Image (spheres, rainbow, N blue to C red):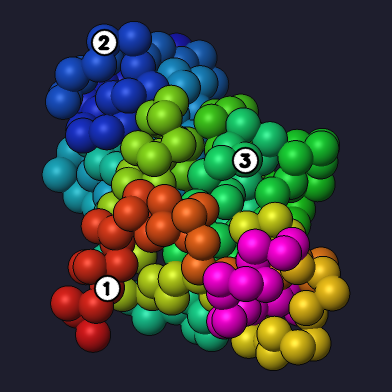
Amino acid sequence: MGQITLTIHGKLNDFLPNHSNENSVQVPFNQKTALKHIVEVIGIPHPEVGLVQVDGHEADLNYPVQDGDIIHIYPRVVVEQQYSGDGPKFVLDNHLGKLTDYLRLLGFDAVYAKDWPDGDIAQYAHEQGCILLTRDRGLLKRKIVADGYCVRADDPEQQLAEVVAQYRLNNYVTPFQRCPRCNGKLAPVKKEDIIEQLQPLTRKYYDEFTQCTGCGQIYWKGSHFQHMQSMLSPYLRQNSEEQ
């Protein structure tokens, strides 16, 4: 039987009952156990943990706790990094449908695992090297999940701002390159090739179109495009300034 003192820093306190910037808790244990187990028992998913310090020395979540340990747990901080290909890939569970749409509109590969069992979502994230976004901390606690984040906000626009900030996505924004319906890539298409699929007023007033290479959905710069452009403008502006 032993006891350790955990000091939880920053946004990891979102998972604790007392939401402050720093909480210290005493945690008893009765057998040799890894720090990861204790951290998740008190509610913190392991993918959100960054620096771990035990009695002033750096450790990791595999550390076997000892009686009297004083341990500091800090949130993971994503540093500026180069993602391969088109940037980071995401998989999102059924709580985050609108956020999925918004990430796709910014050009990110975002799979919406709406009806998937949790085990399949975790396995997909592992096999495809995706960042798992969810509001279900139990899903993030699955051992196989290496990179994931529990979205805090309720509002989808706030969720987008949260994820862009968490993963430093501004430099990877390529807007309106993906289909918000199916995640397929968009490609320019000649008006004459799709004219039979257009409504009369669309034929009359618009000449530039793109089409999803996956589902075939057609897009043009109508009122819906203008609304989306306005909503996403903070990210589009930051991206253009940083190029």
SS at circle 2: loop
In the picture provided, is 234 more to the left or to the right than 112? Answer: left
**Disc 1 marks which residue?**
239
Residues packed near mark 3 inside 10 Å, few (<14), some (14 to 19) or many (20 plus): some
SS at circle 3: helix
Mark 3 belongs to which amino acid? Gly
Q: Quadrant of the N terminus?
A: top left
Q: Could you tell me how far apart the alpha carbons at marks 3 and 1 are, in whole angstroms?
A: 24 Å
**Disc 3 marks which residue?**
97
Mark 2 belongs to which amino acid? Asn
Residue at position x 23%, y 85% in the image: 243
Q: Which of marks 2 and 3 is nearer the N terminus?
A: 2
Q: Could you tell me how far apart the alpha carbons at marks 2 and 3 are, in whole angstroms?
A: 29 Å
| Start-end of magenta stretch | 199-214
Q: Nearer the viewer, residue 63 or 115?
A: 115
Res 184 quadrant in image:
bottom right
Percent coordinates x, y for residue 171 in the rendering? 31, 75
* Circles 1 and 2: CB atoms closer than 8 Å: no
Q: Residue 190 carries which label?
A: none
Q: Could you tell me how far apart the alpha carbons at marks 1 and 2 are, in whole angstroms?
A: 37 Å
**Disc 2 marks which residue?**
18
In the picture provided, is 170 more to the left or to the right than 83? Answer: left
Residue at position x 63%, y 86% in the image: 188
- Which numbered disc, 2 or 3, marks the residue closer to the eye? 3
